[in-house]
Image (spheres, helix red, strand yellow):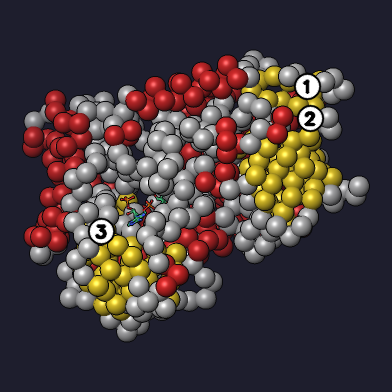
Amino acid sequence: MTERDSVDAVIVGAGFSGLYQLYRLRELGLTTRVFEAGDGVGGTWYWNRYPGARCDIQSLSYSYSFSPELEQEWDWTEKYPTQPEVLRYLNHVAERFDLLPHITFSTRVVSAHWDDNARCWAVSTDSGESVTAQFVIMATGALSAPKLPEIPGIERFRGRTHHTARWGKDEVRFDGLRVAVIGTGSSGIQTIPLIAEQAADLTVFQRTANFSTPAGNRPLGPAEVAEMKSSYPAWRAAQRTSFSGVPAELPTQLALSVPEAEREATYEAGWAKGEIVSLVSCFADILFDPAANETAAEFARAKIRAVVDDPDVAEMLSPRSHPIGTKRPCLDTGYYETFNRPNVHLVDLRETPIVEFTNAGLRTTDAEYDFEAIVFATGFDAMTGALNAIDIRGRDDLALADEWHAGPRTYLGIAVAGFPNLFTITGPLSPSVLSNMVVSIEQHVEWVAECIAFMRAHGYSAIEPTAEAEAQWVQHVAELGALTLFPTADSWYTGANVPGKARVFLPYFGGVGTYRQTCDDVAAGGYQGFTLTPAGQPAPA
Ligand code: NA7
């Protein structure tokens, strides 16, 4: 076997997680191969090229902290970076740290099977390549398995179709066209204003109205960039111990404990910040108490009514089916204003669901529509979709997708009982999507690298969580979630957006600082909750 088909580690994915994991494993001296389905690095930022795609975390916070030199040499240009800017950054990282030679592009991992005798994984790709590796690190992303609407007849439609998460590299224009956008999550809300400027006629099909705050995006001046660079060390330290991976003072007041005028003023101040947590972070009880939540929700609805001219359209755009913050809040630039344009129409799919696609467009229970292009902004099979898409088999031929049939089971969101030497970066039941992803990614990557270094230093060949530790973690994450309003919403956080998917609140809600401490304590205690197998000994049954 050559070094090329037998390596120490295989990493699946070359986004923020995969690139940094590669960097850290190379530092340890591990032979490592990365497989990436795209023909370039970037992950999320490679695939989501739709007009208006932009990060919802400010550029100051949404970047790697592991290299002070990188921090100093890279200049962010806007409060919220665009997709092309983040992708340029990741390409720069890949080149600067000489990562590209270790990445095999345009290649999807289709299976990973654990061999208990050889104590390694056999990994296969869609190009027919097979590689064995002691470790497999799934850097597959939390929002990377796109979903189409579950509506019959998509293949019938003769016009152009685009999914926001599979946008082509060539510029796509909609000038003079009749266009449909289906979906009003973050992607739809970002792209609708830009498509509306080009299209002759745009119809937005909305199943659930979402809460969105104006981003207040703007260019960053040189003084701000300089200030950012000088504050990085303190900012990074604060990120790591914060609740969400973005340093912020946590509110202590309860929404209903203050006079109405003070409450409104607090919401106004939050709104003006232009952040996804603008309103939910105003008071301590917004995500816990329905009555408190309703005050923030109504504040947001009043903002919609103030912008949208037609009261009926404003009401359709006003979320009423879920507490604010329990579906991912959105940031926008001119979203609600777009519905004042004469060429933009809104269809409420709760009133008139889509029945089927036709040759010329689609048919709802109420009308038939003709389009030249349909944009699917219909989201993802979040957090578990990309992992379940790979045929992952652990000890005794255990299939991960079967194990997770009733919802994902992990220890710390990073490892799975029965699947030795497999790590899931920002996996289900870790803070992941409730946090600044880059902070959570760096924490997981570093934890994995240190775990592997520990194993090598102490002569262990395999590590795997115990079933008990895993069960306790699953229960802990569920109990934390149950304290909040999150489980009440039909959201991708709960798996409710994918028909047939188990309804489980997928992220850990304890905060990234607390979570980091837990992971550090586990490691410091000699990897409590894990079974470590010395090299040369049989693995425990
Ligand atoms: P989201 O937030 O999951 O939004 C998908 C949207 O598509 C949402 O409005 C869905 O309605 C709608 N949808 C999904 N399936 C259908 C069908 N079958 N019919 C009609 N409408 C449908 O995905 P995004 O890409 O916008 O954002 C994902 C995350 O990426 C975002 O939160 C950020 O973290 C970055 P629903 O709400 O399910 O009723």
Kindly give the residue lying farthest to the bottom in the view shown: 176
The vertical placement of 505 against 45, above or below, is: above
Give the CA separation, mark 3 to mark 1.
Answer: 54 Å
Report crowding for label 1: few under 14, some 14 to 19, many 20 or more residues within 10 A (C-alpha): some
What residue appears at the point 84 percent right and 49 percent down from the top-left corner?
5
Q: Note whether ligand 1 is within 8 Å of mark 3.
A: yes
What residue appears at the point 20 percent right and 48 percent down from the top-left corner?
319
Instruction: Measuring from the top left, give residue 515's x and y in whole percent.
Output: 50, 26
- Tell me which numbered mark, 3 or 2, is placed earlier along the sequence: 2
What residue appears at the point 43 percent right and 36 percent down from the top-left corner?
502
**Residue type, numbered disc 2:** Asp
Report crowding for label 3: few under 14, some 14 to 19, many 20 or more residues within 10 A (C-alpha): some
Compare residues 217 and 417 and report the one nearer the observer: 417
Decide: marks 1, 2 in contact (CB < 8 A)? yes
- Tell me which numbered mark, 1 or 2, is placed earlier along the sequence: 2
Q: Which mark is residue 353?
A: 3
| Residue that carries the numbered disc 2 in the rendered image | 116
- Tell me which numbered mark, 3 or 1, is placed earlier along the sequence: 3
What residue appears at the point 70 percent right and 57 percent down from the top-left corner?
126
The reply, left or right, for residue 218 in relation to residue 456 is left
Q: Secondary structure at mark 2?
A: loop
Placement of the C terminus among the 4 image quadrants: top right
| Residue that carries the numbered disc 1 in the rendered image | 539
